[in-house]
Amino acid sequence: MHVLEVQSLQKSYRSSGKVVEAVRDVSFSISAQEVLAFLGPNGAGKTTTIKMIAGLIVPDRGSVDIAGRDPHRNSRALRSLGAVLEGNRNIYWRLTPEENLEYFGVLRGLSGRVARQRARGLLDRFELSHKRKTTVQTLSRGMQQKLAIAVALIHEPQLLLLDEPTLGLDVEATQTVKQLVREIAQEGRAILLTTHQLDLAEELSDRVAIINKGKIVAQENTADLIRQFSGMVYQIELEEEINRSFLEVLGRERVANLQSLGAILDGDRIYVRETELLYQALEILNPLAIARIEKDQANLTDIFLKFIREEHHA
Amino acid sequence: MLELFIAQLKWSSIQYRRYASEAIGGVIALTATFYGLFLSASYIGGGGVQFGDRLDSVIVGYVLWSLVIFIMGGIPGTLQREAQVGTLEQLFISPFNATQILLFRAIGDLIIQTFLISIVLFVIMLTTGRWLSFSPALILPFISVVLGAYGIAFAAGGLALIFKSIQQLLGIFNFALLFLLTIPTESWSGTQKLLGWILPMTTGAGLLRDLMARSQSLNLSLLGLALANGLIYFAIGITLFRWAERETKRRGKLAGY
């Protein structure tokens, strides 16, 4: 069952007499317990798409469906949505964490009593209870961001939009946010995550959608996408021996045998294609000491750049 | 609905309490003005509304003038402040519509402002020993003026959404307000009288003058007209604001201040 379904979203703006197509035919969906990393360079159309989902920008064409309701036609759809938007504080710095949670709780349709109860629970869970009476402006950036996420969860929405949730956070705070995102998804919520930290996206997401110049250029299961772009090449690294060159360590015969397998010797490393050949290569190398064997693994950064550059050259 | 209203009132009171230094500036200005009025019953701060020479008339006139200015700047001011502090979009991601939220917040602010004015007035009456008496009949025409003022505030809010910076326009609004609240439409006749009924807030302000300065009793048919005038301007303001909200969302410029 999809919590969010976005169908053929389209949005153009008029800018100094020209029509700029900000979002072109964007479609995707997110299910409960799923994290979709929505990636793209600056100005690719990420924020416009997110704001169309949140009902803040009216699309020219296409539809948004959050838990069976269209936020542009039925404001009840917004009961199922929580959002932490980029470039916004999202919370009142002049209020305390407790006051923010209670106020936004009522604003999202809770009664004052339920908002107070949930606020206490969230403050405990997000380890902010000791700061509940401190004004937000005096909290650390990490705590402020944790609170913004807690506020977005006060009405227990099925869908959470997180636009750059780790922007400007230090390493420790980033780790905390990462852990929270994982937990929130495990609770059964659908999460749309945008970030420029691709390692974070790789770690957290179940699926990836890459948008460039307003168009989705790739959309796939994260692990599959990485597998697809990872080669079948193995890299073997031998223990270094002092005062002896790599070729001396190997010896002429081994070098010839390895080359006959199609292995490539580059610097102090041996590259072998396919798993079967790896074992043959290891037999040739026996009994030399091996420091490391590694399968060439693509990462999301490489894949992301490949798609963006391909589009650029197209 | 009630829960939202209580939450907004609480929000406004926290802002006033926590940032008392900002509120104190306003209270000092209020106190100075009222004190001036008490010392010289015919003097009105800033050459404002002439409601008559009796002290209570002058005070009512000044309170009306200052509250209407407060109301008119309230909605566009809230929109601009919220955009600056980065919370505006969160107000629009709510199952309640933005008009409701802004109206409740504006009423919350007005209640607190009225409360502050009442305290200041009471303290001055206590210290000077000059006690004012207000007729409860003033409340209804007062409400008609306040309704019209909220209508204009929402229209100004709509302009703030579309054009973003409207400070200079608000200055012109305040100038127009002086005209609307002081023009003696109650003494007009013929088509001019009709015009007087159409202009925002003027019928209600005229009724207040009748009650305060001329000591007349409340004219119920005029009161009906004043309330209808207030309601119509309120409805026009809300309609304009909703149109501006849709238009801003269509242009994708909600938060771009």
Image (tube, grey):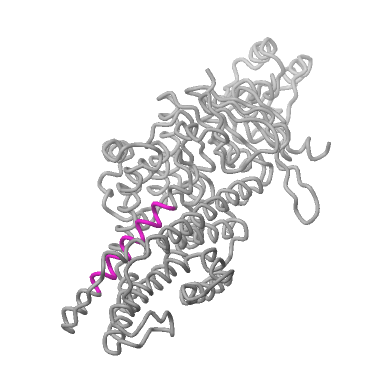
How many callouts does the rendering have?
0
Q: Is residue A314 above or below residue B216?
A: above
Residue A204 position within the rendered picture, expressed as x and y whole percent measured from the top left: 51, 30
Residue at figure coordinates x 49%, y 73% from the top left: B185
Residue at figure coordinates x 66%, y 27% from the top left: A7
Residue at figure coordinates x 30%, y 74% from the top left: B27
Residue A258 position within the rendered picture, expressed as x and y whole percent measured from the top left: 74, 17
* Residue B115 among those drawn in magenta: yes
Give the residue furthest to the bottom: B40
* Residue B169 among those drawn in magenta: no
Q: Which picture quadrant has residue B26?
A: bottom left
Residue B1 position within the rendered picture, expressed as x and y whole percent measured from the top left: 36, 42
Q: Is residue B95 above or below residue B167?
A: above
Pick the front one: A282 or A39: A39
Where's the C terminus of chain B, which quadrant?
bottom right
Residue A223 position within the rendered picture, expressed as x and y whole percent measured from the top left: 59, 22
Q: Which picture quadrant has residue B209?
A: bottom left
Q: Is residue A2 above or below residue B104?
A: above
Q: Which residues are magenta?
A: B103-120
Pick the front one: A266 or A140: A140
Give the residue furthest to the front: B190
Pick the front one: A83 or A146: A83
Q: Please state if B167 lies on the left or on the right of B52 as rendered.
A: right
Pick the front one: B87 or A77: A77
Residue at figure coordinates x 78%, y 17% from the top left: A262
Which SS type dominates the magenta stretch? helix
Give the residue furthest to the right: A314
